[in-house]
Image (cartoon, helix red, strand yellow):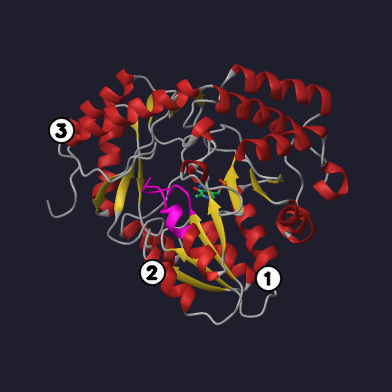
């Protein structure tokens, strides 16, 4: 074992990959045991929907499995084009462009917009997803971070630049905290400072806003205020992949210059067909968002009664902030012993001293599942460090 890995073992920070032998709704079979999972990002319960599966199979029968090439070569199929149109329409943007992953999309946008631009800066929330941070570094732009959800801090960072072009980038919903970015204030700031606002809505799309159009729509903002919208297909939409939506000019620029789009094989057309079916369901089936919201409320009420260290999150991500990595791991293991899979999230994914149980809820859960989770938490009694 190399030194850094053994250091992780010493400090309860070793990451361990589990093999799921079978998944059925929120249930996961691991090592011969059936566990009730509270760790997936399948917020609307679409990952196993029969319409997605049928669309996937139909397209695979018609088109085969691989797209065989990058979009600009000959990999851009009818399914991709239809999906891009549907995503643009859903998010109220002129156009959308697919990427194979959200990670690649965040690299591609920043590299296309900031790469090679003299003095360019990217101002980012301290808790932004790793791919936004990495994207800025790869673009060679100067990274300036501000305290979490603090528009005044962002303003200070923007004011410190001369006249250089600036991107102001934030998660719409923060992946490990579940809270929503102060988007209206950030949009006003970007407008005032002549910066471009980019929102990564991986965890907001499908969950927030009318017809699930996401955190930006929920904040009453459109393309003019938040010109660069990125979101993924692997969370509420139950598929995989990602897209960027915005003006025709933005999308043309990404098509030309975003290297992860230009130089990477297009996602399988069958996946695009499944995602198209998912977009339709996510837009039309409000009951999924309503059910999810009711489960979130039930969980928060029960967890507050138990005195658990809830964070201030209105979304499907409901972390319990324990602080200590070892305690978080022990709580996760104690829950697993009771048949529940809840992941411990530890540094460096979260800041030091802020380890937690990341509980995620889904429309695939039932009230009885939430109650079972609360009962188990009541027995385990995970507490914040120092309590
Ligand atoms: N942005 C955020 C906020 C995310 O949580 C994630 C996934 N964890 C990504 C981007 C990356 O998306 P993908 O998994 O499609 O690479």
Please name the predominant secondary structure of the magenta segment in the image.
loop
Q: Mark 1 Cα within 10 Å, few/some/many (few <14, many 20+)?
A: many
Mark 2 and mark 1 residues within 8 Å of each other at the beta carbon: no
The magenta region covers 171-186
Residue 33 visible? The answer is: no
Counting from the top left corner in percent of width and height, residue 52 is at: 63, 23
Tell me the CA gap for discs 3 and 2. Answer: 35 Å
User: Mark 2 highlights which residue?
Assistant: 153
Between 210 and 317, the one lying in front of the other is 210
Q: Quadrant of residue 148?
A: bottom left
Picture residue at 36% right of the left edge, 19% below the top: 366
In percent of width and height, residue 116 lies at 70, 75
Q: Are marks 3 and 1 in contact (CB under 8 Å)?
A: no
Q: Disc 1 designates what residue?
A: 115
Position of the N terminus by quadrant: bottom left
Disc 2, SS: helix
Q: Residue at x 74, y 36 (%)?
A: 268
Mark in the foreground, 3 or 2: 2
Task: Work out which residue is located at the far bottom of the displayed protein and give it.
Answer: 162
The residue carrying mark 3 is 305
Which residue lies at the image location 60% right of the left edge and 73% below the top edge? 141
Establish if 155 lies above or below 322.
Answer: below
The crowd level at tag 3 (other Cα within 10 Å; few <14, some 14-19, many 20+) is: few
* Tally of marks: 3
* N-term-proximal mark, 3 vs 2: 2
**Which percent across, then down, holds residue 21?**
51, 27
* One can see residue 333 in this view: yes
Q: Secondary structure at mark 3?
A: helix
Membership of 27 in magenta stretch: no
Q: CA distance from mark 2 to mark 1?
A: 24 Å
Foreground: 35 or 33?
Answer: 35
């Amino acid at each position: 074992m190399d030194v850094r890995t053994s250091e992780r073992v010493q400090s309860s920070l070793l990451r361990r990959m589990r093999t799921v032998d079978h998944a059925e709704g929120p249930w996961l079979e691991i090592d011969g045991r059936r566990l009730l999972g509270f760790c997936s990002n399948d917020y609307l319960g679409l990952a196993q929907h029969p319409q997605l599966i049928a669309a996937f199979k139909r397209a695979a029968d018609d088109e085969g499995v691989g797209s065989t090439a990058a979009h600009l070569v000959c990999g851009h199929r009818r399914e991709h084009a239809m999906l891009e149109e549907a995503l643009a329409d859903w998010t109220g943007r002129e156009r959308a462009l697919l990427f194979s992953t959200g990670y690649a999309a965040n690299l591609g946008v920043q590299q296309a917009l900031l790469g090679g631009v003299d003095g360019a800066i990217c101002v980012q929330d301290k808790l932004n997803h790793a791919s936004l941070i990495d994207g800025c570094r790869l673009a060679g732009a100067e990274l300036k971070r501000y305290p979490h959800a603090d528009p005044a801090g962002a303003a200070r960072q923007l004011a410190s630049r001369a006249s250089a072009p600036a991107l102001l980038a934030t998660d719409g919903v923060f992946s490990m905290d579940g809270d929503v970015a102060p988007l209206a204030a950030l949009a006003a700031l970007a407008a005032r400072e002549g910066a471009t606002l980019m929102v990564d809505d991986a965890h907001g799309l499908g969950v927030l806003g009318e017809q699930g159009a996401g955190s930006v729509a929920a904040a009453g903002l459109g393309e003019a205020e938040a010109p660069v919208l990125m979101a993924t297909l692997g969370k509420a939409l139950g598929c995989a992949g990602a897209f960027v939506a915005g003006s025709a000019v933005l999308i043309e620029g990404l098509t030309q210059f975003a290297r992860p789009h230009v130089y990477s094989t297009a996602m399988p057309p069958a996946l695009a067909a499944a995602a198209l079916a998912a977009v339709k369901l996510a837009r039309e089936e409000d009951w999924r968002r309503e059910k999810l919201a009711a489960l979130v409320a039930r969980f928060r009420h029960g967890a507050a009664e138990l005195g658990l260290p809830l964070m201030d999150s209105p979304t499907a991500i409901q972390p319990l902030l324990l602080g200590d990595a070892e305690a978080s791991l022990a709580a996760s293991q104690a829950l697993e012993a009771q048949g529940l899979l809840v992941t411990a999230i530890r540094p460096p994914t979260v800041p030091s001293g802020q380890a937690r149980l990341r509980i995620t809820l889904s429309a695939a859960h039932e009230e009885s599942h939430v109650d079972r989770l609360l009962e188990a938490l009541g027995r385990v009694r995970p507490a914040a460090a120092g309590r």
